[in-house]
Image: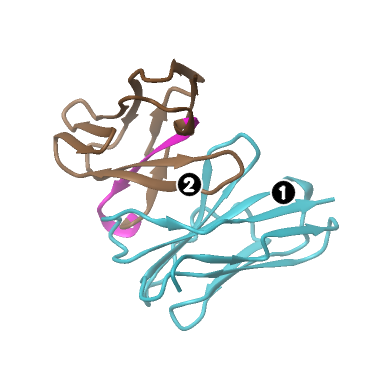
Chain colours: A brown, B cyan
Amino acid sequence: QKEVEQNSGPLSVPEGAIASLNCTYSDRGSQSFFWYRQYSGKSPELIMSIYSNGDKEDGRFTAQLNKASQYVSLLIRDSQPSDSATYLCAVNLDRGSTLGRLYFGRGTQLTVWP
Amino acid sequence: GAGVSQSPSNKVTEKGKDVELRCDPISGHTALYWYRQSLGQGLEFLIYFQGNSAPDKSGLPSDRFSAERTGGSVSTLTIQRTQQEDSAVYLCASSATGTGYGGYTFGSGTRLTVV
């Protein structure tokens, strides 16, 4: 069973704080990891991808991957009210007939209050 | 096209009617995926097309659901004899490589309401 688990939240942080979003996955064969942002009533938008252990930074966003612990996280520094959205973790199992298919967590709802 | 295009954006249908949802992926993308998202719920995988390979239909919830992809481009998702539980946002996504590397780009979705 391939599973991707996220805390559903809601997570509430003040403007300017660091928001930390966490995700665990069940399949050790997973190779590609993604974070999507979904505003209410909109479709998911890819914001970060990570493929190797360690940190990957893009502006205010940092993705962290630990394959041994089967854990991926997203840090948002200097959080802004415009970051308020649901964040979806997605994992690709890169083998066999499921090649290319992403498995999504249920999402963590983030609210950044001014 | 510049993005993934879905039509219609909204569809209201009576229970028991058939509906067709259309997806036009990003030009050159070999992989195309359909998901649905019910209100307040996560993304539910439906079906996946990769090039000329047989589609992965493992997520289709019943035999009322079918999809095809013509010419390796446009895809149509058909729901026959719609039920109220089919009400959801149907999302289409495409990917350049079909390996998952690089992630997907989603369309804006079709909101289906069955009354």
Describe the element under mark 1 as helix, strand or loop. loop
The question of residue A90 being in magenta is answered with yes
Q: Is residue A12 above or below residue A48?
A: above
10 Å neighbourhood of mark 2: few (<14), some, or many (≥20)?
many
- Residue in the picture at 44% in, 32% down: A83
Q: Is residue A62 magenta?
A: no
x then y, percent, for residue A5: 40, 29
Q: Would you say B39 lies left or right of A72 here?
A: right
Residue identified by numbered label 1: B87
Question: How many neighbours does mark 1 have within 10 angstroms: few (below 14), some (14-19), or many (20 or more)?
Answer: many
- Asked where in the image residue A56 lies, by quadrant, the reply is top left
Span shown in magenta: A84-98
| Mark 2 residue type | Pro
Residue at 57% across, 46% down:
A42
Left or right: A77, with B68 as reference point: left
Compare residues B81 and A51 and report the one nearer the observer. A51
